[in-house]
């Protein structure tokens, strides 16, 4: 189980090695994604809070990266954080997510990216539920629900 100290360590010292990587040109990503998906995942944007019904869906399944299809989260780790973005307590694997320090907008945060294709997913915070205490606050447009 990942904890905040692990997240900070990855952000400072390097991320776990992914199983494989996917590289595409900006033009290839643009052709594959909707303008909103491209803006969030490839340009590090943020969707409006409460703009997706994904926040209130709590059925079994898994969530994959909208860009490369890599599995990122299981619905059993999803919870209602009240923030307006889908939230999870843990990724499916330690090496599913990459972490980078984000000091933009005068804030100190940890950005989360797909460790396979570098798609911006959102941020992780140390204010989630026990036992791990993590809240992976994800942009819904960066995820796609897949059946378990």
Image (cartoon, rainbow, N blue to C red):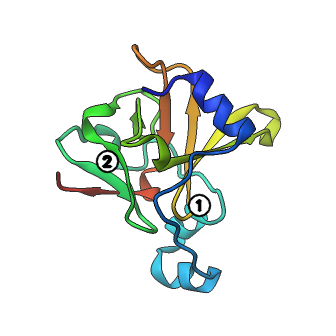
Q: Is residue 93 left or right of residue 123?
A: left
Residue 119 point in image, percent of width and height: 56, 60
Q: Nearer the viewer, residue 91 or 128?
A: 91
Q: Is residue 80 left or right of residue 57?
A: right
Using the image, determine if residue 74 lies above or below residue 113.
Answer: above
Q: Disc 2 to disc 1, how far (Cα)?
A: 25 Å
Q: Residue furthest right?
A: 106
Residue at (35, 28) in percent of width and height: 80
Residue 11 point in image, percent of width and height: 69, 38
Instruction: Report if the CB atoms under discs 2 and 1 are less than 8 Å apart.
Output: no
Q: For the N terminus, which image quadrant?
A: top left
Indicate which disc, 2 or 1, sits on the residue closer to the N terminus: 2
Using the image, determine if residue 37 lies above or below residue 124.
Answer: below
Q: Quadrant of residue 12?
A: top right
Badge 1 element: loop
Using the image, determine if residue 13 lies above or below residue 127.
Answer: below
Residue at (61, 66) in percent of width and height: 42
Badge 2 element: helix
Residue 92 point in image, percent of width and height: 36, 42
Determine which residue is flagged by label 2: 53
Determine which residue is flagged by label 1: 118
Q: Residue furthest top?
A: 130
Q: Nearer the viewer, residue 124 or 105?
A: 124
Residue at (60, 31) in percent of width and height: 7
Residue 83 point in image, percent of width and height: 48, 31
Q: Is residue 101 left or right of residue 83?
A: right
């Amino acid at each position: 189980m990942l904890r905040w100290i692990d997240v900070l360590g990855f952000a400072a010292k390097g991320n776990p090695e992914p199983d494989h990587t996917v590289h595409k040109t900006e033009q290839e990503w643009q052709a594959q994604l909707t303008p909103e998906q491209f803006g969030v995942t490839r340009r590090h944007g943020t969707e409006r809070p409460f703009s997706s019904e994904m926040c209130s869906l709590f059925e079994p399944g898994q969530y994959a990266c909208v860009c490369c299809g890599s599995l990122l989260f299981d619905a059993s780790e999803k919870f209602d954080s009240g923030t307006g973005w889908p939230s999870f307590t843990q990724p499916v694997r330690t090496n599913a997510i990459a972490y980078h320090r984000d000091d933009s907008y005068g804030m100190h945060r940890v950005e989360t990216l797909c460790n396979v294709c570098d798609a911006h997913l959102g941020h992780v915070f140390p204010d989630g539920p026990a036992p791990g205490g993590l809240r992976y606050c994800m942009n819904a447009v960066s995820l796609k629900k897949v059946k378990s």
